[in-house]
Amino acid sequence: MKKYKKWIAMGVIGFLIFLGFFTGYILQRQKSSTPLSLIYIPKTEDGTSDFWSSLISGARMAASEYGAQLEVMAPKNEQDVKGQIRLLKKAIEQNPDGILFSTSSSSAANEDLKKAKEKGICITYIDSCTSEELQDLTVATDNVEAGRRLGEYARTIIGKDDKIAVISHVKGVSTAVEREQGFREGLGDYEKNIVEVVYCNSLFDRSYNLAKELMEKYPDLKMIAGMNEYSSVGAARAVKEAEAKDRIATVGIDSSQEAVQLMEQGVFKAFVVQKAFKMGYLGVKETILHLEGKKEEKNIDSGCELITPENMYNSEMEKLLFPFNTKKNT
Amino acid sequence: MKEKKKNRDVLRHFKSVRSALFAAISVMVLCAVVIVVAISLRFTRTSVFDNAVVYTRTIVRQTNQNIDSYIDYMDNIVTMVSGSRDTQSFLYDKDEETLQVSECRQRLVEQFRTILKSRSDIRNIGLIQKDGNRLFNNGGQQKNAYLDLDTQAWYKNAITSNRSVLTSSHVQHVIRGERPWVITVSRGVRNFTGSGNREGVVFIDLNYSAISELCDQNSIGSKGYVFLLDQDGNVVYHPQQQQLYNELQTENIDLVMNTDKETLMDGSGDNAKIYTISRSEKTGWTVVGCTNVAELLKDSKKARSIYVLVAAILVIAALVLSNLISRNITRPLQQLRDSMARVQEGDFGAAEVEVTSRNEVGSLTRSFNVMTSRIQELMKQNIYEQQQKRKSELKALQSQINPHFLYNTLDSIIWMAEGKKNEEVVVMTASLARLLRQSISNEEEQVPIGQEVEYARSYLTIQKMRYKDKLEFQIQVDAQIMGVPIIKLVLQPLIENAIYHGLKYKEGKGLLIVRGYREGENAVIQIKDNGAGMDEQTLSHIFEKHKVNYRSNGVGVYNVQKRLQLYYGMDYGITYSSRQGEGTTASIVIPMNMIPMKQEADHEKI
């Protein structure tokens, strides 16, 4: 009989151990981790740029979906490099889990980003990169590809000796360099037609003025290509004002409601849209996955699309051109 | 049958009925619990799925009906507006007085205002034609001048159809300065005053507040949701429409659009989804309910863990219970076994077993009790009978005064009396009287050694007077053993034996010494004579029955020895030592303290 008692006792003990593990397992599963804290520093959030507001809304949506805390610290305008550095320093002081950064300059932020890395903060580049590779991951449009697609299309709407002027945003900034490079690649042997490259420092007015100057300087100019929203829309305004829309084809990268209108009006012949919402969303999502150790991929391409007056009312293009935000915010 | 036999064999391996019972009950309960749990787990899994599917199906159908009636309602508004006289004249009365047109416009604006006020889900309501009057909402907004209406599906389809047209999610470009995502219900308006063709369109743009409410009002679990597809598989509404539009979220729309089934599975593992589909005849749209399989599994996992828990508790309870039951069933059996073992050892003292049950074991116990009590009775009776037998045997063996001795003594007294030896006559008669009294009167089996010694003394006194010059005696008995009980008439026959076989043949005067002393736990009485003695052969035959000497008192040494051993056991009795020509010593050994009767009875049996 003693033997059986031993068996029973062993069974009961085993059962209790099993219960212990079981409850432990359940408790562990129920234990909710503290939300990750993220800070996003875009180039600007001035309300005039659909690109940035769309990007930020994507970032916010991803943060709320994945249960992270996202704070957006935005300088007033894109050329406020010092302001952006100040915000970056402030963000590093807060010691968040991750900083998402869209640099306005190619190298000004390098020192501070190094400090942030030393503190163990995950650095994610969104949209643009610095001259040094300090990031843990990058979520951006393949800017060379964007430029190339624009260049390839541009080649189909101009003649082989038609003059092309390029208005870029900031000299030396990664996006500007890469897009111009891509644009040139896309143009192929038409590349020689580029008569001048100017920089508007991401200001509508400056771009507008530059376009006017270019039109005066080159009366037989056939195409103006803007390398971002400010440069292309500014140029388009100038072309529209000069009533030169049939003479000068305006193409660009990035869109806005104004750009769409200008395309409807026949000023814009084409533009490449970046998927700003997707970029912001993926930026936050990938950062969270990286912090949780679930993802290894370092460079994420958010993609781009070429819009022309022919396809602008297609449902697929509408989805990119017009942010779907009629719905109550989730 | 074979199985059963085998089973029985298995149970035979157990050392006790209790463990066999315990094992059998435990195994049975365990099997039952395991089977029940397995079945219910399976059943739970399927029923969780089935319930989810049925529930989702109900929701999806309900949603579909709601959307139908919602679109119906909008259709009614559009139809009403398109059929009104005001619309006709506002759109097509070109040459009439502008006053009338503006009156119509006024009434339409009023109507639109009322509609917009009461329906917050209507983004825009308007009348449009390529050229001529247009009206949007309260009349304050302008058409997007650069928009080619023919590129807009909601317009183109309304112009060519004689029914209301439903256009799923798209961007409304028609009003200048805004480009909202809307769902449009539009209807062409025939120009009855002019060509008779449909030249103008009434449209209502719906924002998503009502649709999202209809789709979101019923939750399908915490991760499930409802979305809406149009006839071409484009998403009309999705709770994560923005993510879907930005390729951040995917639905297997091809699968949904190309199936006739109402329910289908997509994906595997944690990402598996169940699509529940309901198509609408009226709108051509498809309501799809999406259920997260992982979530369902979580529910069934929860149920599973509860089942396992309950099963474990049941098993433990079953083990405890089967232990109790087997103990209860087998306790009387064990008691019976223990009692039998005791009886086997000869202990009848606690043989009676308490009868606790009315079943077979109970009757067995009763029978056992009856049996043991009968055995006990029989044994008691046996012992009693043995005792009686021994008593009567003892009695029979108890020697009486040899009649020859009495005649001889009386003859001696007569001769003494004739010889006028008065004093000697008195002594002899007194001794004889004492001897007779002692041998007849005392009914007790045992007497103290002292009394026996006195009896021997009386006998020796008589004999000494009869064989004057032939016998001398001495009695030396320790006072210590005087009180020790001894069976009657032991000394006298031995003394008689010593006189007749030893001293009688001795030439000259013989000496007989009676000595009594203690030796350890025993009392020893020696009768020592210096008579003829015996050779080895005679000595070895001394206790034989046939040696009874009828001349003497008729009982002889054999009887005394037999009585002593009957009474005290084989360890006690008489031992002889003798030497030819030198004399004989008889030693009687008895215990100082009488040992119990029972042991003696056993010895007797053996």
Image: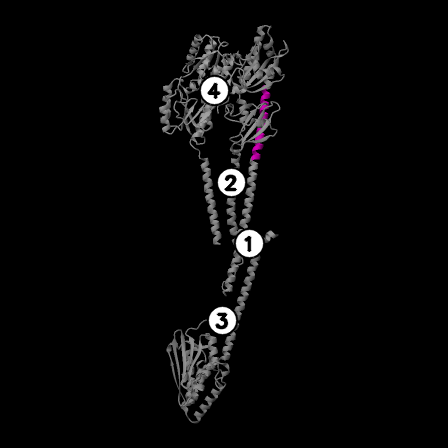
- For the residues labelled 4 and 3, say whether their Cβ atoms are less than 8 Å apart: no
Of badges 4 and 3, the one in the foreground is 4
Is B416 or B210 nearer to us in this picture?
B210
> Extreme bottom residue here?
B419
Which residues lie in the magenta part? B49-74
Give the mark count. 4
Q: How much space separates mark 1 and mark 2, taking CA atoms?
A: 34 Å
Q: Which residue is mark 1?
A: B11
Same chain letter for marks 4 and 2: no
Please determine whether, in this image, residue B463 is positioned above or below residue B237.
below
Secondary structure of the residue carrying tag 1 is helix
Q: Main secondary structure of the magenta part?
A: helix
Same chain letter for marks 1 and 2: yes
- How packed is label 1: few (under 14 Cα within 10 Å), some, or many (20 or more)? some
Of badges 3 and 1, the one in the foreground is 1
Q: What chain does badge 4 belong to?
A: A
- How packed is label 2: few (under 14 Cα within 10 Å), some, or many (20 or more)? few
Q: What chain does badge 1 belong to?
A: B
- For the residues labelled 3 and 1, say whether their Cβ atoms are less than 8 Å apart: no
Q: Which residue is mark 2?
A: B306
The label number, if any, that marks residue B602 in the structure image: 3
- Give the amino acid at mark 2: Ile
